[in-house]
Amino acid sequence: MSTTTHHSAVETGVFDEEHTLHILSHFLPAQSPLKDFVHHNTLHAFQEQQFFQAIKNASSIFGYKTSLSLPAFRKKYKNGAINDAVIDRIISEKKGDDSVSEWREKLIVTSYDTTIYQKVGNLRATWKKKYKTDLDALVHTTLFKVINSYLDQGVSLWRFPETDLSFLNSVKKMEENSFSSFFKTKRAKAFLMRGNIEIQELLEIIVHEESYYENYLIDQQFAHPGYSGMVSVVEHNPKTLLDSRKVTLKEFIIFELLLEIDALDAKFGETWIPIGLHTDEPSENLFAQNDFTELDEVLQLWQLSMEWTFYDQVLAGLSYNKAQAPKRSTNSFQALFCIDDRECSIRRYVEQNDANAKTFGTPGHFGLEFYFKPEHSKFTTKVCPAPVTPAFVIQEFETNKVQKKEIHFSRHANSILGGWIFTQTVGVFSAFRMLRDIFRPTNSPLATSSFSHMDKNSTLTIEHKGAFDADGLQIGFTYQQMTDRVKAVLNSIGLVSDFAPLVYLIGHGASSVNNTYYAGYDCGACSGRPGSVNARVFAAMANHPEVRKLLAESGIVIPESSQFIGGLHDTTRDEVEFYDEDLLSAINQEKHEANKPVFAKSLDENAQERSRRFVSIDSSKSLSKVHEDIKKRAVTLYEPRPELNHATNCLCIVGKRSLTYNLFLDRRAFMNTYDWHNDPEGNFLLNILNAAAPVCGGINLEYYFSRVDNYKLGAGPKLPHNVMGLIGVANGIEGDLRPGLPTQMTEMHDPLRLLMVIEHFPEVVLNTIQKNPATYEWFANQWVNLAIIHPTTKAISVFENGEMRSYEPLIREVPTFLNFSDEILSSADNIKVKNIA
Amino acid sequence: MKNFLIQALPFVFLVPFAGFILSLFFSRTNEKGISRTAIFTASLQLILAVAITAAWFMNGTEDISVAEIVLYQMHGYEFLIDLYLDALTVTYMLVGAIISLLVIVYSSFYMHQEWGYRRFFSTVLFFIMGYNATIIAGNFETLFIGWETLGISSFLLIAYYRDRYLPVKNAVKVFSIYRLGDIGIILAMWLSHQLWHENITFIKLHNTELVHEHLISHSFLGSAIALCILFSAVLKSAQFPVSSWLARAMEGPTPSSAIFYGSLAVHFGVFLLLRTFPFWEEQTGVRVLIVMGGLLTFIIAGLTGRVQSSIKAQVAYASIAQIGLMFIEVGLGLQTIALIHFAANAFLRTYQLLISPSIVAYLIKDQFYNYQPVVEKPVTNKWVNTIYMLGLNEWNFDSYMYKYLWNPLKSLGNGLNLISEKNVYRLFLPMYILGIYLAFNQDVMPFELKQYLPSFFAMIGLFMVLKSFTERKSAGVAYSLIILNHLWIALAISFNDRINFEHLFFYLSGVVVFGLVGYLTLHRLKKFEGRISLEEFQGHSFEHPKLTIVFFIACLGLAGFPISPTFIGEDLIFSHIQRTQLFLTLFVSLSFIIDGIALIRIYARLFLGPHIKTYHETAHRSS
């Protein structure tokens, strides 16, 4: 939607309900319920604008803080995190060579009024100013309670009595059939009883002046963006709730308007003056463009300087990198990992520990789109990128898992009579459980484990045998469908020849306890689920003789001796589990056994590298001890940071492994293996970018905005969070839902936009990115920065204003670690890009 | 053995006190130093609790009362610190020590990187100190010291996230309820003076004959005391009809909600009843009332809890329901069962809150595998729906509190337009001088006037404090009105026949010192910030942390918290009020209660809440 259409209602003075509802659901937070937590650009609604213009507008409209504060930038500069030479270069590029000293002064010394003003909320502030009425305080408690109880997925022991009707009809039915009421006065209730209410007629009572209607609703809904956003998400995707509900934003607004009328009637009787007649200011166009102030420009220059201080290191590192993987005597094994930034370091260790091994990066759903249905489950769960709607289902059978129960979540604990017996008996037991959990954290039914997503010993319906499930989903894939998918992945990463005897597919997932954000820690490419099923299914497909035959026909010949094997890396605990090991040939089984110590050592080392960021772990202890401590984090109730997830991410590198080989990127890079040789036209590249730009860009920007405004765009500290209806978290019991990421996930993060680096010819890339407008928008509007490394000359170009311009790094030489582990373990801060030995 | 117990008992209070003081000396970022101090203190506390328990058993579980020190003694009045140890003390002490240690260890990791790390642990230690002071208290006066500490630490823990609106609002709300509950204790203390003519120790209440003898001649007084105690207990344990505050107190970090509202503090109502059991044991009416109240709470809180769709609210109401049952048990005289019930409920609720974030992953998984679509709708009829909706609205208790308590007080205060800055000089100053003249020359007025004047002056004092409570414009005016209130009360009391001016001087010394400090602080803040109004929360603690602390301490002193002679002074004042002066008692005690609330309100409005300057990050008001 373009901004130019926004102000129609304000200008014409005519209220267009549909248009207003559209604006609202466009700008409200789009975060799904907790179980489907997937990272996305927090300011997605502004994405059609240039980044800096967008964040300026977002700040002016909603009062968001959209970059680090001026003092924070200056502090970073003092600490050396922002480079002088970069500042000068940025200023001279943006402001001209003559203005460098003038603007340096502004950046570093000049003081500014950094007050943030917001447009949203001004109209409804009249209630307090002129009516001395805190309308929100009178309405919110009831509003939140009713909507949360209606949407509740299982916290309450006594569910909302009417949920098969739509929200408003449910409320109506309860009002009709009760001696109690949510309303205190008659008029509002009478409206509800009458039914068929239109927003407009209620606004006429409350506001009266039509030109204010739209702004009134925007003010009202953005007083509690959490619940409004959730309602809008559920409206557009009802299946996101397992126990589904029919609710629309319109109904929610009507209910709120009724509560407002009720509150005002209760205070003033039925004869109060509508707010529109009590306001002096004319209706304001909230969405008008906002001009940059000098402070805005200073902040922009700071942001660019901070970004390019790091980008420059990265581009220099990639461009100068002469390190070649040691000539492999044989291919011992190949391993495909997810592009996830958390897999960046484990790949390095695997290759260090076995010089004949080679790793690849590809999105962790391994190009497969399907629903997974675990045995005994009542639902299916999507295990591919969130925007994709699969037509396939993979079912799980012959498991022997037992779901362990947690007595403290028993319904009796909080019930009435049962509670007495329960308290007297279990209560004493609680003391011992607490002692154990605090002094010796161990696994319990409370914890989530990535390995329990799928039973290791189950069988899966991978081959399509003509059957479809009740929802019409095709069970399993045909050989041709398998081949197409396997081929696409192998082509995109350039693994089309020289197959090693063993090719690992390692998905990833996470384990944690007491973590409402658990879904956000799993694989983003699998819609916030672990990637185990995908890895296992892909291996089975690629091993199938029929598929091999079809693959050979299209030019990819995989020797019969080569076998694929699936696995799962738990990024929290640094453990790996392999699947279908018994299907390996005898000789490959031997080789697999020989590879296991390589993985084990790499996991230990990876755990140690991660431990440098954790204050509670002493990294100087022995490898195995440090790894034990890392594992313990995942089951420790009082550990709000089981792992750091995507914190510090800011790179996405699409190219051959040789580009990054031996380069220390500090787990900040998404890495998609891509061989330009195979793809002169950029066809595979387009597919990669179509996924990588929104997935990596979305993750990066969610971290960015939750970091710069943890109060409004982030969720604040996790510590006081209260679980609301299993769909979201709030502070305390009266608060609005808090979308975004909590402080504990973002405090380590530096708000740098993602730099996508592609290894290919600039003209091919330029051509490719323009093929898909949705993908192009990310780059064109600079929500994601883009740089190209020329495959042969290693020259760097940077994408700006629709074209490529060449870039010369300021750094002339990339430093090398003297003593790798000492240097990295001695600090918990970000480490500059360096060569490893 | 007994000697050991006598020696050891004060340390139950002194250990956390020392830990609290020590914790203040660490720098804000020294997490290790702070957490080690807290863990060491809590461990020591647990060892001490175990040792005392063992010694107590070896001593044959005999009740022990130690007259510790006389804090103040003058002209027929003494303020005695008295300690007491019995099965009740031992149970609360052990459960408290175990939960404190667990929660502190839990928090030492959980709170890592928090801006308020030190503030959190200092407050928790402060709370533990208050908790233990209350449970080892041997008389009402000593108990009241702990009781007040609990109120303050509760306020600080709820408002831990002081830059958001809801925590601060709810902290003030809960503090007000606590403070209201204090009326019960203050009146019970006053009435006890009337009944026993001494500071009665709890151990003496076990002297059945003594109690019986006093009650038989003053049965009305006896009932009044019991009802005052019950009133306090009901408020403190969030019983019917004031249950709604407990869930709203869950604004701080989860472990603080667990230790405070989940387990320890919320059981103080039960404690108070058990502590005074021998006193009302023979009063059947009171016992019936306790049982009925408990039953009502049990049913209503139980029904309310079932409906709550947020986990903390559900746990809060489930806990209230169990405490309702404990009231029944206490009322029926089943003390041992009540004690076991207390321990079990405390552990269970603490654990439930600590693991509450896990419920999402656990129940979603459970739902994924075990979901049963509702095939047949459950029976819904008018009554079922009614109870559901009442439960969802928490039986409207929260709005009733506004409608029938706070709003009338506010409109009363708002109506007092006579009290303006101008009139303070034009009207009230001359009146006050006249009052002093009359106090010194009591012979000049007729007897009738002399009878009514004290109440009249106390009423003016009360009006001052009500005006302060509702003042929206000037913080300075609101604050000064509290000081004036104390002066009016002093004047009112000075008409008493046996008044001793040294007592008055003692009472006012705290008022003057702390009042002056607070006033100067406000003055300084005004110099920095210009107009400081009370219209909205201003969050100045962020830019003026030192002024914040000084002003907070001044407020505490002025409100008669036991750091100020005013604390004993207030008790002294009451010792001068005759049993017949019912109105005077009412005005004075209401003044004391509301001045605490008004002061905390001033403090919160000025120093807490989202910052008015939006170059600081601020949260949505609803978050």
Image (cartoon, coloured by chain):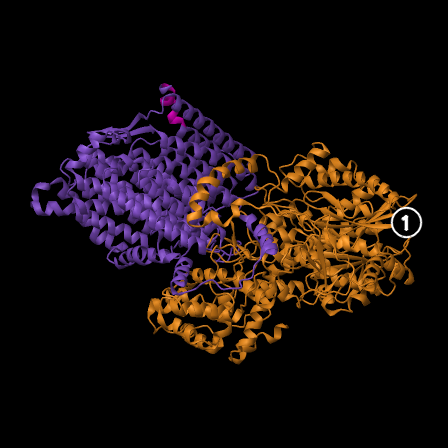
Q: Nearer the viewer, residue B116 or A378?
A: A378
Q: Residue at x 71, y 32 (%)?
A: A622
Main secondary structure of the magenta stretch: helix
**In this image, A421 relative to A503: left or right?**
left
Q: Quadrant of residue A201?
A: bottom left
Q: Colour of chain A?
A: orange
| Residue B319 x, y percent position in the rendering | 42, 46
**Residue A253 in sight in this render:** yes
Q: Which residues are magenta?
A: B3-11
User: Where's the C terminus of chain A, which quadrant?
Assistant: top right
**Residue B596 in sight in this render:** no
Q: In this rendering, is residue A701 above or below A427?
A: below
**In this image, A260 relative to B30: left or right?**
left
Q: Residue at x 26, y 35 (%)?
A: B506
Q: Residue at x 46, y 29 (%)?
A: B46
Residue receiving disc 1:
A561
| Residue A830 x, y percent position in the rendering | 69, 45
**In this image, B515 relative to B255: left or right?**
left
Q: In this rendering, is residue A227 above or below B508?
A: below
Q: Nearer the viewer, residue B118 or A315?
A: B118
User: Where's the N terminus of chain A, which quadrant?
Assistant: bottom right
| Residue A351 x, y percent position in the rendering | 82, 43
